[in-house]
Amino acid sequence: MRGFLTLIKICKEKRKMIMSLAFADFRKRFVGSYFGAVWMLIQPLVTIAIYAFIFGPYGFKSSPPVPNVSYTTWLIPGMVPWFFFSEVMNMNTGILQEYQYLVKKVVFPIELLPIIKLISCSLVHLFFLLVMFLFALFSREPILITWPQVFFYSFATAFYALALSFFTSAVSVFFKDMQQIVGIVLQFGIWMTPIMYDETLFTGKAPIVKWILKINPMYYIVAGYRDSMLTGHWFFERPGLSLYFWGVTTVMFLFSLRFFRSLRPHFSDVL
């Protein structure tokens, strides 16, 4: 817990440097690219279009559980947090190798590197939140008072991703294959989260599968985005799931941060 409080103190003291490095990281990702930041939208939007075609009215004709809502309108609030989570995990796992010149500086608090990359990814996420809101408006969905609640669930996604990132980034320094393992787990994880399908699909057939899906913290986040955008439900209407998510994620965060700090003295030697 002391390490967490220390991290907050450092973030407060170095907030200007953190934001400066985060914006620099964001710009660096598109240096030399003709279309620049446009590419950050194209691939995810193409992915959404493919899933919408396969599972929507032209494919398997999946019916969303929300009445009078098209499959695409239901799909987008599930895909947007997953894009954010997967991007943070992919980017942060190799963050120490990418910024090894800062890792080797004794005076630089390297615990800030995953946070800097997280903020950089959050800038991309803001674009997708805008796309999600605009699509809902163009689809003539009713504007709900719960729409701003997606920012609460965005914070939940960021906190969960950061909790995992401290662990994967530290391991990646000593075990280079961690980057590939994370990529495989993410490919598997998107299907272990009810994003393209509704979990009621398993009701009566394999009820244990529905229980397993809810163990995944991303279930809480995806359900929260859809609650906010489509059904108008508040986060406190899922008290058990909320306590489970924040309890598990907090424990993971404290463990990962302590694990990261324990290996920190050896990073510069290996890099």
Image (cartoon, helix red, strand yellow):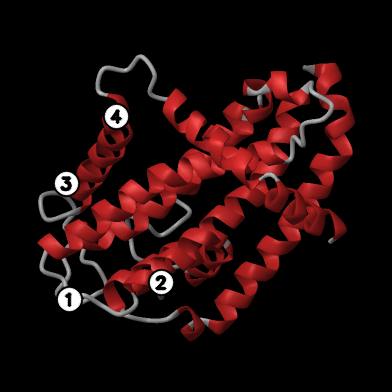
In the image: residue 202, left or right of residue 178: left
Query: Which amino acid does the dot numbered 2 rest on?
Result: Gln
- Residue furthest top in the image: 32
**Left or right of 92 on screen, residue 255:** right
Q: Residue at x 43, y 28 (%)?
A: 27
Cα distance in 3D space between marks 3 and 2: 29 Å
Q: Residue at x 61, y 68 (%)?
A: 245
How far apart marks 1 and 4 lie (CA) works out to 30 Å
Read off the residue under disc 2. 149
Q: Closer to the observer: label 4 or label 3?
A: 4
How far apart marks 4 and 3 lie (CA) works out to 21 Å
Q: Residue at x 32, y 55 (%)?
A: 129
Residue 200 in sight here: no
Mark 4 nearby-residue class (10 Å; few <14, some 14–19, many ≥20): few
Which label's residue is closer to the chain start, 1 or 4? 4
**For the residues marked 2 and 1, what is the alpha-carbon distance in whole angstroms?**
15 Å
The residue identified by callout 4 is 39
242 relative to 26 in the view: left or right: right
User: How many residues crowd mark 3 within 10 Å: few (<14), some (14–19), many (20+)?
Assistant: some
Which percent across, then down, holds residue 186?
51, 41
Amino acid type at image mark 1? Pro
| Measured Cα–Cα span from mark 3 to mark 1 | 24 Å
Residue 14 image position (x, y, % from top left): 69, 44
Residue 142, numbered circle: 1
Residue in the picture at 75% in, 62% down? 251
- Chain-order first, disc 4 or disc 3: 4
Nearer to us: label 3 or label 2 = 2
Circle 3 sits on which residue?
Answer: 53
